[in-house]
Amino acid sequence: MCTFIAATRPGYNLNNLKETLKSLPGEIFKKTLPLEVPALSISSSDIRQRVREGRSIKYLLPEPVEQYIKENKIYL
């Protein structure tokens, strides 16, 4: 009743994922879509610099962490 998404992780390539998926039972294999997810390069140094410069850190951290940094004026 559903379609599964199998996503790559940083350091893994899509072809390896596709090979791994072949070991799934036929019906599940047919309902599974492989998806390559680009790796994000996020460094703590970049986050600290962005905060100091007043630039956005949205989407680089979980929202509660972003809020904690703002509320406690960390890295300023």
Image (cartoon, grey):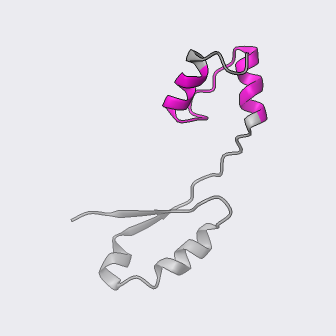
Residue 31, given in percent of the width and then of the height, sits at 33, 70
Examine the rendered structure and indicate whether residue 24 appears above or below residue 40: below
Residue 34, given in percent of the width and then of the height, sits at 48, 66
How many tags in the picture? Answer: 0
Say which quadrant the C terminus sits in.
top right
Q: Is residue 71 within the magenta segment?
A: no
Residue 59 figure quarter: top right
Q: Which of 50 and 16 is in front in this view?
A: 50
Residue 28, given in percent of the width and then of the height, sits at 33, 76
Q: Residue at x 55, y 80 (%)?
A: 19
Q: Which of 46 and 6 is in front in this view?
A: 46
Residue 4 figure quarter: bottom left
On the picture, is 24 further left or further right than 48?
A: left
On the picture, is 40 further left or further right than 19?
A: right
Q: Nearer the viewer, residue 74 or 5?
A: 74
Residue 42, given in percent of the width and then of the height, sits at 70, 41
Q: What stretch is highlighted in magenta?
A: 45-69
Examine the rendered structure and indicate whether residue 63 appears above or below residue 6: above
Residue ranking furthest to the front: 72
Q: Is residue 59 within the magenta segment?
A: yes
On the picture, is 58 further left or further right than 28?
A: right
Examine the rendered structure and indicate whether residue 27 appears above or below residue 49: below
Say which quadrant the N terminus sits in.
bottom left
Residue ranking furthest to the left: 1
Q: Main secondary structure of the magenta part?
A: helix
